[in-house]
Amino acid sequence: MTVLRLTIKVQKNLIVPTQGSAVCQDPGDVAQQEAKQREAEMRNSILAQVLDQSARARLSNLALVKPEKTKAVENYLIQMARYGQLSGKVSEQGLIEILEKVSQQTEKKTTVKFSRRKVMDSDEDDDY
């Protein structure tokens, strides 16, 4: 019984320093984290009002694969909502159309350039 009580006291002591370290953080960092959290909550509430459930699910799936494209689509939707350009909730099909527009705008053109090395060619030996 004594060993059990001792381990519980040790575990409680291990937890206390981690709680104290949160208090010792720079006040600017705490304020910055709170501002980011408020902004994220505001974005989520706007997107919840603008998108229906299936569109939200598709957007969250896209966030796992391409977070930069998701941010661009979210910004686009929030901007449209702020200026009153959306009529009702955006369906999954509407979100797909918006995704296609954003993809076309941010499409990167890839080019492949071949650089061939000049090596001793076997054709030169056939000249005699």
Image (cartoon, rainbow, N blue to C red):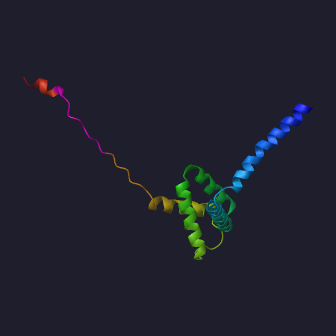
**Which is the main secondary structure of the residues drawn in magenta?**
loop
**Residue 97 visible, this orientation:** no
Between 123 and 72, which is closer to the camera in this rendering? 72
The quarter of the displayed image where residue 89 is located: bottom right
- The answer to whether 27 is drawn above or below residue 12 in the figure is below
Look at the image and give the residue range highlighted in magenta: 113-122
Image quarter in which the C terminus is found: top left
Q: Residue at x 56, y 65 (%)?
A: 75
Q: Is residue 66 left or right of residue 50?
A: left
Q: Is residue 115 magenta?
A: yes
Give how far across and how far down residue 60 sits, in percent.
63, 55
Q: Residue at x 55, y 67 (%)?
A: 76
The extreme bottom residue here reads 84
- The answer to whether 28 is drawn above or below residue 121 in the figure is below
Between 42 and 46, which is closer to the camera in this rendering? 42
Image quarter in which the N terminus is found: top right
Give how far across and how far down residue 47 sits, in percent.
65, 65
Give how far across and how far down residue 64 sits, in percent.
59, 50
The extreme right residue here reads 1
Q: Is residue 114 left or right of residue 110?
A: left
The quarter of the displayed image where residue 22 is located: bottom right
Q: Residue at x 88, y 34 (%)?
A: 4
Number of marks in the rendered image: 0
Give how far across and how far down residue 44 sits, in percent.
66, 63
- The answer to whether 32 is drawn above or below residue 5 in the figure is below
Q: Residue at x 41, y 55 (%)?
A: 108
**Residue 56 visible, this orientation:** yes
Q: Is residue 70 left or right of residue 120?
A: right
Q: Is residue 120 magenta?
A: yes
Q: Is residue 127 left or right of residue 7?
A: left
